[in-house]
Every structure is written in structure tokens, then in C-alpha cells.
Image (cartoon, rainbow, N blue to C red):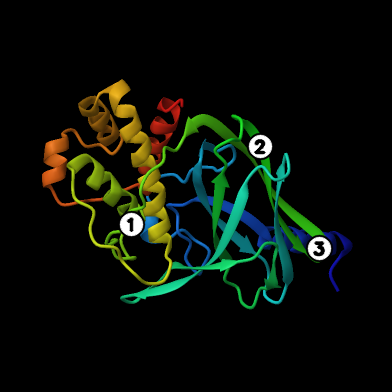
Amino acid sequence: MPRPQVALALSLFCAASAARAQSVRIYSEFRRIAPNGEVLEQDRPGKSREIISPAVARNGFASFRLVLSAPTGKSFSFHLSDNPEGSFKYTLYRESPARSGQASIPDLLEKVPLPVAGTFTDSSPLTFWLDILVPAAIPAGRIRLEAQLNIDDQWIIYPLEVRVQPASIPRHSAQSFPLPVAQLSSAHSALVPLQNYLCGKPAPAPQSGPLTSRQMIARNAIQDMAMARSLEPALGAPHLHQTLLGFLGATDVKTWCASRLEAPADPELYLRIRDFLIKSAIR
């Protein structure tokens, strides 16, 4: 029979382990999560952004990856709450693996209603793609957003302070084109729209098939390129193009366009392009 001090230590350890096992994590759209709960190897380089106070543009989408974890057999419910209430429109998609070679890669998206309820059937976390539609008419300012996971009588809260910027996504045509294969870095899906914009490549024929996170990453990058086009009169197209490529470590637009498309080692380097465009677009 353990001594009182040992029993207390074991009790505290078990309680701490249980708390760690139940969690809500939020990542950028470029950090896909493997079944073991770790970021996929091809999306792992660099230091992951801490998603606490993201800046978003109006009249467009902002997207994040949600990861819910709890012990096997635990029932849960998951909610989203914003303040002021009704500031954003949310769409949640459950991620599921797309078999690519020998690797199981989360890529397929299935829309699920909010709030979400279910049971953790094994030790793998549940992963979701969260789309936030930011209305065109919303005033610039800060909106509190909480991701709320309820297990038993415990609430696990991930608070965000979303910074709505004066920037607004211009009206633009939807585009569809062949996407990179899933086993490549997630940044490849954002670089295809960037390449089409900088290199003047024609829009390919539309693709059909199930919805994937690669399509959503590309859609968000298309929004970014619409902002870039709106900035050309003020910043000058050559200067703007060179500035955007500079965030990826490239030095010459012509050389970059003539070379094979390669994603940066850190997929979140692309977010520097988005940050720059949001800060520069003031209309």
C-alpha cells in the first residue's frame, strides 16, 4: 500500500496527465495533423505560428485547423462562440485521410453542423478545418472568439482575439486548377495561385471531385491575389511582385517563373505574403 505522500503524488500526476490528454489546439491552415497528433513531417519545418490574435480581412474567408484530443471512450461536445455574438459565419469540416502512396494524409473535407458532438473512439485526435467568413460590412476592430470543448463536467477553452482589419477582399472570379498531390508540402497549394498571378499563366480547366483542404488553401490564396491586383496601381506591379517573392526567399520574378515550382521549407512563410497584403490593402 503506497505511503500518503506517494499516493498524493500519484493522484496529482494522474490528474495532470488527464488534463494534458484533453485539449483544444488551433493551427494555421498550413499545418496538417497526422493521426498521432503531430504535425505532418512535410508541414513541420520552421516554428508553428501561435494562433492567438490573427489578423483577417473583410469580405473573405480566414481558415484554421482545429485539433481536439481526449482519452478513448470520452464523449464530447464542441462549440464556437464569438463576442459580439453573430460577428462571423462559421463552417466546420471534419478532416479524413486521403491515401497517397503509403502515407495517410488528412485532406478530404466533410461539412459537419455546429455544435459537434461525439465520442473519441481511439487515441487519435479529431481534426477539423474551420472556415470563418468575415462579412464585408463588419467594422474594423477586435472580436473575441472561443473554441469550447466540453468533456464530462469540464470545459477546455481556446480563446482568440480576432483582429478585423480595414482591408477588404475585392470581388474576383473563382478559379479552379489542377492541385499538387497531397503528399507535398501544404504550401504548394497556395503557390499555384501565386504562380498564376506573377507569371501570367492562364487559368486551367476546372477540376471535379471531393472537397479537399488543398482546394481551400488555394481558394484563400486566390483571395490574396485579388488583393494584390488591387494594390498594383498604388505600389507598382514590378515592385509588388518582387516584394511578394522576397518573402519566400526568391530574388527574381523572371527566374522564379521559369523554374520548377518549389515550396519553401517552412510552409508558413507564405503567411508573410498574406500579412503584407492585408496591411497594405486599406480599402
Looking at the picture, which amino acid does disc 2 mark? Ile
Q: Is residue 203 visible?
A: yes
Question: In terms of image quadrants, where is residue 120?
Answer: bottom right
Which residue is denoted by mark 3 in the rendering? 11
Question: In terms of image quadrants, where is residue 226?
Answer: top left
Where the N terminus falls, by quadrant? bottom right
Front-most of 136 and 23? 136
Lateral position of residue 150 relative to residue 172, left or right: right
Looking at the picture, which amino acid does disc 3 mark? Ser
Q: Position of residue 84 (x, y in %)?
A: 73, 39
Of mark 1 and mark 3, the one earlier in the sequence is 3
Which residue is denoted by mark 1 in the rendering? 185
Is the C-beta separation of discs 3 and 2 under 8 Å? no
Of mark 3 and mark 2, the one earlier in the sequence is 3
Lateral position of residue 179 relative to residue 86, left or right: left
Q: Residues within 10 Å of mark 3 (few under 14, many from 20)?
A: few
Of the two numbered discs 1 and 3 in the rendering, the one whose residue sits closer to the viewer: 1
Q: Position of residue 28 (x, y in %)?
A: 49, 49
Q: Position of residue 227 (x, y in %)?
A: 38, 35
Lateral position of residue 226 relative to residue 71, left or right: left
Looking at the picture, which amino acid does disc 1 mark? Ser
Q: Is residue 264 visible?
A: no
